[in-house]
Image (cartoon, grey):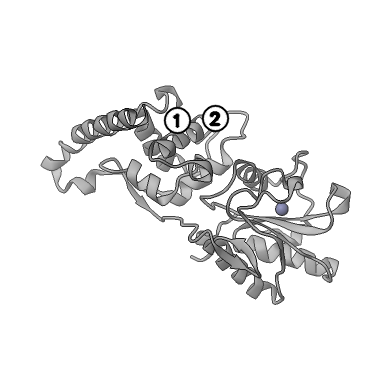
């Protein structure tokens, strides 16, 4: 049943595309008529919006989320009533269905747009700018498995910190059951703080946050040995539990089951950012 379904969707997509692009032929180049969507803003909303108790919008994201939702609706994957610019759980599910229709599974069908799936969804519908790429999934940092984007971010944080960042756990791993699935996908690492003073630990948290990690010092009082847990904001390979931690970080919470206030001292906090934005 899989192939006929996909063919039907693509055929229907082509029909919609023809209807949309025909008037543009009179006004000028067809490309000029397509909306331009910022992938960074779509990813931001896809991480921040789903756990919200309502359909609240992420500032700056609506114009970029709407064309994605409209495309999913045109393909029969999202109810028209859910096209609202809020990238909530319905949109996550619909996007994951789109990824499965493209033949993806597992972390590749996590409901967060990747460059390939988003570009295909946008064919004759919208143009994608500011692509976010995780890069190779078999890269490493200090001998631990991470993707290329995460390795690049860690190197930048290391340079800002002025010390050596030592990972105690990498990404794409289910080896630690106490991590609640956050390390199953990309962008997530644990960093050793052994041998660092309290001030150095907080400075390292700040350095990580500055390059776009949602990073927290985990403590014995929280039920962990001391370490820093860090999630690379907007990594397209992120697992669902890691996505929820970015939501928490965005709203100044701790990313744990308690969702308590972030206990990071004020002087070590920075405005919310992500890697690509931090480099502009
Ligand atoms: Zn961790």
Give the residue displayed 62% in from the left and 67% down from the top.
Answer: 154
Within-10-Å neighbours for mark 1: few <14, some 14–19, many 20+: some
Foreground of the two, 68 or 107: 107
Q: In the image, which disc is placed on residue 27?
A: none
Image position of 166 (left or right of 12): right
Give the residue displayed 60% in from the left and 70% down from the top.
Answer: 156
- Assess whether mark 1 and mark 2 are in contact (beta carbons under 8 angstroms): yes
Q: Position of residue 73 (x, y in %)?
A: 37, 28
Give the residue displayed 79% in from the left and 65% down from the top.
Answer: 193
Q: Which residue is mark 1?
A: 84
Foreground of the two, 201 or 238: 238
Residue that lies at the very extreme toward the front in this rendered image: 1
Residue 76 in sight: yes
Q: Position of residue 261 (x, y in %)?
A: 77, 45
Image position of 215 (left or right of 152): right
Tell me: is circle 2 under 8 Å from ligand 1.
no
Q: Which residue is mark 2?
A: 55
Foreground of the two, 102 or 266: 102
């Amino acid at each position: 049943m899989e192939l006929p379904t996909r063919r039907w969707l693509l055929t229907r997509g082509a029909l919609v595309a023809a209807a949309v692009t025909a008037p543009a032929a009179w006004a000028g180049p067809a490309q000029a008529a397509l909306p331009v969507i910022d992938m960074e803003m779509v990813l931001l909303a896809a991480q921040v919006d789903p756990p919200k108790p309502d359909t609240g919008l992420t500032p700056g994201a609506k114009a970029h989320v709407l064309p994605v939702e409209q495309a999913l609706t045109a393909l029969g994957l999202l109810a028209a009533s859910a096209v609202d610019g809020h990238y909530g759980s319905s949109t996550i599910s619909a996007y994951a269905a789109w990824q499965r229709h493209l033949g993806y599974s597992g972390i590749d069908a996590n409901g967060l747009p990747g460059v390939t799936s988003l570009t295909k969804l946008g064919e004759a519908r919208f143009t994608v700018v500011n692509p976010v790429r995780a890069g190779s999934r078999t890269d490493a940092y200090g001998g631990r498995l991470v993707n290329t984007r995460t390795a690049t971010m860690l190197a930048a944080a290391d340079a800002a910190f002025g010390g050596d960042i030592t990972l105690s756990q990498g990404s794409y791993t289910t080896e630690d059951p106490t991590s609640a699935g956050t390390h199953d996908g990309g962008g997530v690492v644990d960093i050793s703080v052994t041998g660092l003073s309290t001030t150095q630990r907080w400075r390292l948290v700040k350095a990580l946050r500055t390059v776009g990690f949602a990073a927290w010092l985990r403590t014995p009082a929280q039920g962990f040995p001391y370490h820093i847990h860090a999630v690379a904001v907007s990594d397209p390979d992120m697992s669902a539990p890691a996505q929820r931690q970015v939501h928490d970080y965005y709203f100044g919470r701790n990313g744990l089951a308690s969702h308590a206030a972030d206990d990071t001292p004020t002087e070590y906090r920075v405005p919310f950012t992500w890697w690509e934005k931090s480099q502009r």
